[in-house]
């Protein structure tokens, strides 16, 4: 019961009692009627208490009112937002499914492409080697005498076949890396001997281009280095080959073996291949290890490179637990740094 109702109720009772005392003759009433009046008055006074206590049970409606109270504007707004969210959720789930399917299609295409590259590269390697050795035999005069002019063209054919073989080998290396088929065989290697043997392979190349190629080595005796010499030779050959390719006629290339990181926390041998060639433009320096990337100044000098050598090189060096990085200045020169831990640490 509300407070105002109780107030008016009691006021009415007080007025009735007051009127009874004012206008009634109380002395005339006998005992029974007096007690009746007192009892009735008490009952009336206590009645609101019973009424109030029983209120909770009585006011809870057992059924909802027939006409629902008007929905506030905010509630309608929340409902609308909820509906929109549910729609967006459905759209996102559909997009998600689309992306998963597109991704599966891409993976299949990638597999098909890898298979194509792998099969093609394998198929190309044998006939290319036959072409190269045929040029070689004619050049050496094993199939009869050739004129100077013929030799010039034969040499071009030989060089081109060698370049294509390099590209095919790069493609096969990438295929092996991507399919996880690269097997590493680690053995202990005498580092200086190993470097000198590789540098020696470039004797004819540097002579042709009138480039000075030298090995700089420490005077101390170096410890043996654990490595896969076949894979790491490919890396050093690629670095020296690049240095010669991207250095103009009459330039200089140096392969330096450094021992100053030998007694650090993690003993590594550092090899630096430096040249005074075309350098790498600052804008391209962040992309140099990406596969197929070639900077514009390199394309201008050697139009038919693959842009795969450095990508493969970085993978191989990191498998040895080493690092490969460079510093370069356009039109001044480039230095590639390669570190190899003395003991095998890579996967
Ligand atoms: P490729 O030599 O066949 O293009 P690489 O992966 O070996 O492929 O090299 C990638 C690119 O890095 C080259 O195209 C060239 O732009 C740049 N580069 C590598 N070595 C040198 C270097 N010594 N001097 C200048 N640029 C270089």
Image (spheres, rainbow, N blue to C red):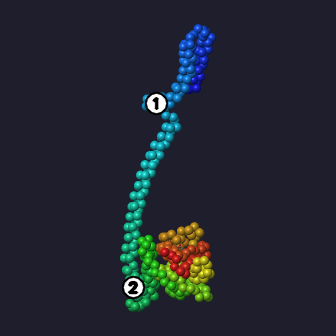
User: Which one is in front in this view, the residue at disc 1 or the one at disc 2?
Assistant: 1
Residue 289, percent across and down? 52, 71
| Of residues 318 and 120, the one drawn nearer to the viewer in this rendering | 318
Any part of residue 156 in sight: no
Outermost front residue: 31
Taking the spot 47% from the left edge, 80% from the top edge, the residue there is 231
Q: At numbered mark 2, what does the secondary structure look like: helix, strand or loop?
A: helix
| Of residues 228 and 52, the one drawn nearer to the viewer in this rendering | 52
Taking the spot 39% from the left edge, 58% from the top edge, the residue there is 101
Q: At numbered mark 1, what does the secondary structure look like: helix, strand or loop?
A: loop
Taking the spot 56% from the left edge, 20% from the top edge, the residue there is 42
Q: Is the residue indicated by label 1 positioned so its CB lies within 8 Å of ligand 1?
A: no
Q: Residues within 10 Å of mark 1 (few under 14, many from 20)?
A: few
Q: Quadrant of residue 332?
A: bottom right
Q: Report which residue position mark 1 lands on.
A: 61
Taking the spot 41% from the left edge, 66% from the top edge, the residue there is 110
**How many labels were placed on the picture?**
2
Say the numbered circle drawn on residue 234.
Answer: none
Residue 323's place in the image compared with 83, above or below, is: below
Say the numbered circle drawn on residue 134.
Answer: 2
- Please report contact status of discs 1 and 2: CB closer than 8 Å, yes or no: no
Residue 115, percent across and down? 38, 70
Inter-mark Cα distance, 1 to 2: 105 Å
Q: Is 256 displayed left or right of 169 in the figure?
A: right
Residue 40, percent across and down? 54, 18
Where's the N terminus, which quadrant?
A: top right
Q: Earlier in the sequence, mark 1 or mark 2?
A: 1
């Amino acid at each position: 019961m509300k407070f105002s109702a109780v107030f008016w109720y009691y006021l009415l009772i007080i007025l009735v009692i007051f009127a009874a005392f004012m206008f009634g003759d109380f002395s005339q009433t006998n005992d029974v009627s007096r007690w009746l009046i007192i009892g009735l008055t008490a009952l009336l006074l206590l009645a609101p208490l019973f009424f109030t206590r029983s209120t909770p049970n009585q006011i809870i409606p057992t059924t909802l009112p027939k006409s629902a109270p008007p929905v506030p504007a905010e509630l309608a707004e929340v409902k609308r937002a909820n509906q929109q969210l549910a729609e967006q959720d459905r759209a996102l789930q559909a997009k998600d499914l689309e992306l998963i399917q597109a991704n599966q299609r891409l993976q299949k295409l990638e597999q098909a492409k890898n298979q194509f590259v792998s099969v093609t590269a394998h198929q190309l390697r044998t006939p290319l080697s036959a072409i190269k050795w045929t040029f070689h035999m004619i050049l050496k005069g094993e199939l009869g005498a050739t004129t100077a002019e013929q030799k010039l063209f034969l040499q071009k054919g030989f060089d081109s076949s060698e370049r294509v073989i390099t590209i095919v080998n790069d493609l096969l290396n990438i295929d092996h890396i991507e399919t996880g088929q690269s097997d590493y065989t680690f053995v202990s290697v005498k580092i200086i001997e190993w470097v000198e043997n590789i540098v020696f392979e470039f004797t004819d190349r540097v002579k042709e281009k009138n480039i000075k190629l030298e090995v700089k080595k420490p005077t101390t005796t170096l410890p043996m280095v654990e490595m896969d010499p076949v894979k790491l030779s490919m890396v050093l050959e690629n670095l020296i080959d690049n240095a010669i390719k991207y250095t103009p006629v009459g330039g200089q290339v140096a392969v330096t073996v450094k021992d100053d990181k030998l007694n650090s926390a993690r003993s590594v041998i550092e090899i630096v291949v430096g040249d005074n060639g075309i350098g790498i433009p600052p804008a391209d320096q962040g992309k140099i290890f990406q596969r197929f990337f070639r900077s514009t100044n390199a394309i201008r000098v050697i139009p038919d490179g693959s842009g795969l050598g450095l990508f493969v090189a970085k993978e191989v060096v990191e498998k040895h637990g080493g690092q490969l990085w460079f510093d370069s200045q356009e039109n001044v020169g480039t230095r590639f740094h390669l570190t190899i831990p003395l003991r095998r640490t890579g996967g």
